Image (cartoon, rainbow, N blue to C red):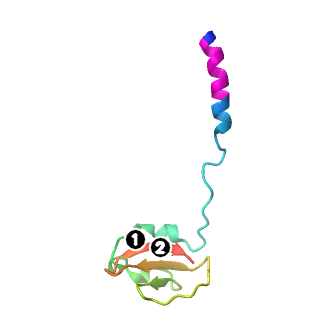
Amino acid sequence: MRALLISVPVVAVLAACQSSVPFEAVSDQCGSLGYLSKVGLKLEEAQESSFPAETRFIRPGTPTTKDYRAERLNVHINKQGRIEKIDCG
């Protein structure tokens, strides 16, 4: 009985510390999450044509604008020709 009385307040305190939302929602207006399986592949293997027509392919040294467009898909390609990162912008 005594152990039960001690454990109830501890459980109540721990429950109060728990967040109702474990993470913030991610905005993915460009659909980048659907292409993450292509990260690590060579661009030829990933088939450039499988990306939307408006996709921006960014290679080392490629000049890019600083404007942010949430609906634009960016595919970052490293010096070895592999897809390094895919994001919106």
In this rendered view, identify the residue nearer to me: 32 or 9: 9
Residue that carries the numbered disc 1 in the rendered image: 38
Residue 6 lies in the magenta-colored region: yes
Residue that carries the numbered disc 2 in the rendered image: 86
Q: Earlier in the sequence, mark 2 or mark 1?
A: 1
| Disc 1 secondary structure class | helix
The amino acid sitting under disc 2 is Ile
Residue 42: % across, % down? 33, 77
Q: Residue at x 49, y 90 (%)?
A: 63
In this rendered view, identify the residue nearer to me: 18 or 35: 18
Q: Residue at x 63, y 17 (%)?
A: 6
Query: Where on the picture, by quarter, is residue 8?
Result: top right
The amino acid sitting under disc 1 is Lys
Say few, some or many: other residues with alpha carbon within 10 Å of mark 1 (under 14 / 14 to 19 / 20 or more).
some
Q: Residue at x 60, y 78 (%)?
A: 71
Q: Are marks 2 and 1 in contact (CB under 8 Å)?
A: yes
Q: Residue at x 50, y 79 (%)?
A: 74
Alpha-carbon span between mark 2 and mark 1: 9 Å
Residue 38, above or below 26: below
- Segment colored magenta: 3-12
